[in-house]
């Protein structure tokens, strides 16, 4: 390809679109550690304790929730950030997909 198109070799890939790439002889590992910390800060959860599961079991949310409404733009921003984070954290995919159903009128219960 170098013969056809002018290009330069920058070496092994280490960082791409916020995804950290670690390569060794046997595997390639993708991480978003810095981005995940940014999302936690964005959500205002820096002082919270970690959980083993991303969502409580058998959680039932409703579009007709009567709890206080939250800023829809901020909610959508958080959900979008989590959707991008789910590229490397597949354990988040179901939870993020579930809460993304409530972007029309998010409430405290959804957040």
Image (cartoon, rainbow, N blue to C red):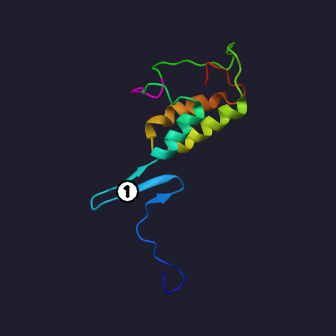
Residue drawn 52% across and 79% down? 7
Single out the residue that lies furthest toward the front.
Answer: 47
Image side of residue 76 versus residue 12, left or right: right
Q: Where is residue 96 in the image (x, y as percent from the top left)?
A: 55, 33
Residue 33, located in which quarter of the rendered image?
Answer: top left
Residue drawn 71% across and 20% down? 69
Q: SS class of the residue under badge 1? A: strand
Single out the residue that lies furthest toward the left.
Answer: 26
Q: Name the residue under label 1.
A: 22
Q: Which of 81 and 56 is in front in this view?
A: 81
Dot 1, crowdedness within 10 Å: few (<14), some or many (≥20)?
A: some
Image side of residue 80 versus residue 71, left or right: left
In which quadrant will I find the C terminus?
Answer: top right
Quick check: is 53 in the magenta stretch? Answer: yes
Residue 76, located in which quarter of the rendered image?
Answer: top right
Query: Which residues lie in the magenta part?
Result: 51-55
Q: Is the magenta stretch mostly helix, strand or loop?
A: loop
Residue drawn 51% across and 19% down? 59
Name above or below for residue 45 compared with residue 14: above
Q: Where is residue 71 in the image (x, y as percent from the top left)?
A: 71, 28
Residue 49, located in which quarter of the rendered image?
Answer: top left
Image side of residue 88 versus residue 77, left or right: left
């Amino acid at each position: 390809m170098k013969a056809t198109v002018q290009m330069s070799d920058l070496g092994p890939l280490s960082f791409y679109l916020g995804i950290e790439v670690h390569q060794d002889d046997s595997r390639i590992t993708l991480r978003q550690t810095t981005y995940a910390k940014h999302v936690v800060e964005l959500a205002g959860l820096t002082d919270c304790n970690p959980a083993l599961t991303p969502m409580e079991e058998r959680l039932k949310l409703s579009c007709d929730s009567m709890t206080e409404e939250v800023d829809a733009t901020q909610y959508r921003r958080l959900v979008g950030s989590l959707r991008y984070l789910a590229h490397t954290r597949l354990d988040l995919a179901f939870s993020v997909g579930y809460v993304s159903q409530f972007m029309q009128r998010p409430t405290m219960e959804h957040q």
